Image (tube, rainbow, N blue to C red):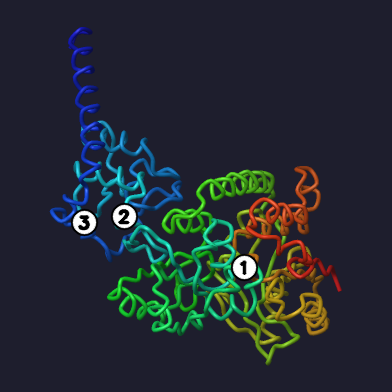
Amino acid sequence: MNARRALVVAVAVLLVLSAALLYVRAENGKLHADAGQSDIGLTVGQQLEEDGFPSESSRLWVYGNADEDDDIDEDDIEYLLGVLSGNNPETVLCDANCDGVVDNRDLQYIQRIIASDDMEVFYVDNYYRVASVSWPVERIAIGYCSGAYVADLTGLADKVVLVDETIKSYWSGMSSHFSKAGSFGATETPNYETMIAADIDVYVVGYCDANADGISPSRLNPVGIDVMFISTADNSGVDIPNESIDRSILMFAFLLQGDMKKTYEYLDWHDSLLELMSEATSMIPEDEREAMIMTRVSALYSTGTYSITGRDNTNNIHAEWVGVDAVGQHSDMLSKNYQDLNLESLATLIMENKRNGKVFLVDNAHDGMRHQYDLGECLAADSEALSQVDAEIHYLGMAREMGNSPLYIVEMAFYVCVMYPEIAESIGLDYEKLFWEYFDMFAGEGYWTDLDIEDFFLDYGVA
């Protein structure tokens, strides 16, 4: 092809693409008339296999995010035009209306999403299934500390009209909206009649629960309430690791129509810290990594057994991201997310996994804003119970809500600062400073000024 002919073809393609884009925008005014002709949402409920997931680099697994970045904007229109013309590869999220076909209707649908139209928006939930939510979202029910912290961060507190009993009991002081909201009971046994009477638009689970999650959609969907399985907490009875908390936060904000500006500001803050820590710890030799074991039950209130975090537990995954040898990720004794060990077995676990005679034991107790137990008292009891173990045990306390919230990035900073103080100093990392910085930058109200950091993170030292 000569240069002149190539130029003519290029101009023609450009004109076709431009005309298509103008067509999309022109059609945007009569979208509802066309909606009945399109079998939208045909793939809802489909279970995705791992080789059919959207890009791991994307945190917005929403259909219509054609270029699979972290937002839906005009770039997705341009990308999909390229797909339809054969110039761009088709991505998983190109099928914006989830009718099973990538075509011009998806161009219209993306434009509707950008315009925040009244519509169904489709996404991949924490079960890796195709799901949907109806816009606009104005009234929501949330559960557990994960829901409270993320709703506060993403500017959704004023939409919260129902909370679960844990938020009502422990985290209602986080927001005046939470304190005024009604309670729908426990995440494991939600009161559906209460949700229906409150006329909510979406119920966002606090964490995925193997029993309740099989019931909730059948009770709520028929009356027009969407159930959203998007959370930042570990799951209950569900063998799916919840490591991508940053993705859950962005999905939560976007799908529930929250404060996207603040959400992206958090992600920028998060990304810079994660990159700083992971890069600084990446060169630690394998045999010099500090060993960490995490218990969710203290000797203070143990009835003889200790719940220990195991393989693919969120806390263990994140610890390994910053150079820690999380014993739960590789020990044959800890093959599940959580498992109960008696004191003798816990002592054996410590002895078999100590590094240079040493191990860090993290007590992941319900302190923090929940303040059900005191970290200092828990660690004192732990050190007494394990005093006969022939190992140097460095005791750390961390409120469980830290790993089940946007503050998990401070959790990782805590590990680095305590386990690798020289590295932390070299990169200017201070977990206490970051703890207060988070609230100063992202909290919706001033509740945090009365918090005590030692209720959230406590370095008890070697007893």
> In the rendered image, which quarter is residue 292 located in?
bottom right
Residue at image point 58% right, 44% down: 268
Q: Position of residue 38 (x, y in %)?
A: 16, 53
| Front-lying residue, 322 or 398 | 398
Say what amino acid the circle numbered 1 marks.
Ser
Say what amino acid the circle numbered 3 marks.
Ile
Give the SS element for disc 1. Answer: helix
The answer to whether residue 263 is visible is yes
Q: Which residue is mark 1?
A: 176
**Badge 1: few (under 14), some or many (20 or more) residues near its Cα, within 10 Å?**
some
Please determine whether, in this image, residue 164 is positioned above or below residue 71.
Answer: below
| Front-lying residue, 146 or 430 | 146
Label annotation for residue 52: none
The answer to whether residue 319 is visible is no
Please determine whether, in this image, residue 233 is positioned above or below residue 260.
Answer: below
Q: Position of residue 113 (x, y in %)?
A: 34, 48
Residue ranking furthest to the bottom: 303
Q: Which residue is mark 2?
A: 118
| Front-lying residue, 313 or 128 | 128
Residue at image point 25% right, 52% down: 97
**Badge 3: few (under 14), some or many (20 or more) residues near its Cα, within 10 Å?**
many
